[in-house]
Image (spheres, grey):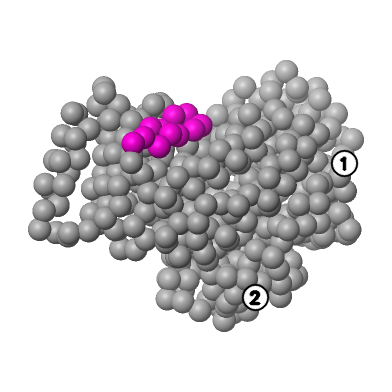
Amino acid sequence: MKKILIISLLVLCYVGYTNALTIVSGTWNRNGNTVYFYEVENGQLKEKANYIIAKDKKFGFALNLDKEGYYVIGTKNSQLMTGKFIFYLKPDDQLNVSIGTNDYELIGENTAENKTLKEWFDLLKPINLNTISSKKGMFMTYAEYYPILEEVFKKAESWNFPQSDNKTFDESFLTFRKYDIALDALQFLFLPKTKQPDINYQPDCYKNFTFSKLCNSDQLMNYPFGNRLLANIDLYAYQVKKKANSSIEFGTSALLNDGLSNIKDELLKGELVLIYAKHKQTVEGLLNFQKEYSKYLTTESQNERFKVLLANKAKNSKGDTAIDFKFPNSEGKEISLSSFKGKAVYIDIWATWCGPCKKEIPHLIKLEEEYKDKDIVFLSVSIDAQSDLAKWKKFIVDNNMKGVQLFAGDKANDISKPYKLNGIPHFILIDKNGLIVSQEAPRPSSPEIRLLLDNTLLK
């Protein structure tokens, strides 16, 4: 009775607005008191509606959908795959569903399309619980995961899904299945792990997860996580090349050009260019990138998104006065950031336990040597635990680290909070007047860093 009342009220709210409402009703059996409904735009989730649930856990939506296709119901934060469930909806459809933590059930009457999607979801459940539910995946080794993946892949290849009366769905579902299993398999590779799987020991099914096999149609951008999958395909291509040539760096023009040459669809080429553009950390670097790759941005949406990236980067590159901090060096002398006013300061926030941080050290040493006669200070701040002070002292000596070396220890929050650190290594550039040039400066290994340093020193 309560469900009927919810839907009736929602329908009444829309009377006179449309005759083709899509009605979604269900029960929310997981944490959180808000259910989010997402549409798909450019291969990413875009919130269309939300519903605050009461104690009875019931929720409902009366939706005026612009088109039939894939939609998502789930938790907040459109960037996270966790807690997201995919459905296929048309104007005038009804969906009745009970959603749990990592699963869902169709209740009562539902469309043939969503019954097929539920069968597919159940088929992939053994692998997606180890990727979408990343906490479990982080503790599973590739030796455990690969046999499960191979078994599921074989079942998926031989599965004859029931044909519906909807030709549009049946055709789209052929590519949807390829995208869905590829996302799960690739996502597992990129979960944080103590030991990453060796490419040489990957199942043969990974040969299907390439640009040439998955990027032949703009249908990828109708898949709810299409943009994520495109980025994962690119990252996987990099890993394969890195295995053959260890000197290859991620995010380079050479890698992008190779990806573009293997993508047949023009729209997807533009989307890959935008993915690379997001990694540019300076206005100068983004403008140089635009000169070379803007020709691939073929739609109004792609050009507008690039303008937003440029505007945000321009805003972020001009900061306020840098917040001061003070930490001891290896001899115990307290040194503050403000003591270097009159010189530019390139700050490296790192730790001895951080693998990516240590990979940047040779590049940082080289950079310091190139700019040793310039008005710039290279300042490294370790956020190792206080108990690792001796380990840090030994590390900087053993690795012949130059510049100013400081140890934050128990006072790490004095730098991590004001500079909003989300991870390390993290680099910040301050100009001669003590103003932030870039709160997320390029790494020493980035081709952008020298241009940014040179422009800063000219001012």
Quadrant including the C terminus: bottom right
Q: Amino acid at mark 2?
A: Lys
Q: Is residue 374 magenta?
A: no
Q: Residue furthest bottom?
A: 295
Q: Amino acid at mark 1?
A: Asn
Mark 2 highlights which residue?
A: 264
The first of marks 2 and 1 along the sequence is 2
Q: Nearer the viewer, residue 29 or 194?
A: 29
Q: Nearer the viewer, residue 19 or 217?
A: 19
- Residue 17 locus on image (x, y percent): 14, 59
**Residue at point 73% right, 55% down?**
236
Q: Secondary structure at mark 2?
A: loop
**Residue at point 81% right, 51% down?**
204
Mark 1 highlights which residue?
A: 400
**Residue at point 59% right, 37% down?**
125
Q: Which residues are magenta?
A: 98-108
Density class for disc 2 (Cα within 10 Å; few <14, some 14-19, many ≥20) is some
Verify CB contact (< 8 Å) between mark 2 and mark 1.
no
Q: Is residue 150 left or right of residue 293?
A: right
403 shown above or below 332: below
Q: Residue furthest top?
A: 387
- Residue 123 locus on image (x, y percent): 60, 40
In this rendering, does residue 124 appear at all?
yes
Density class for disc 1 (Cα within 10 Å; few <14, some 14-19, many ≥20) is few
Q: Secondary structure at mark 1?
A: loop
- Residue 175 locus on image (x, y percent): 58, 61
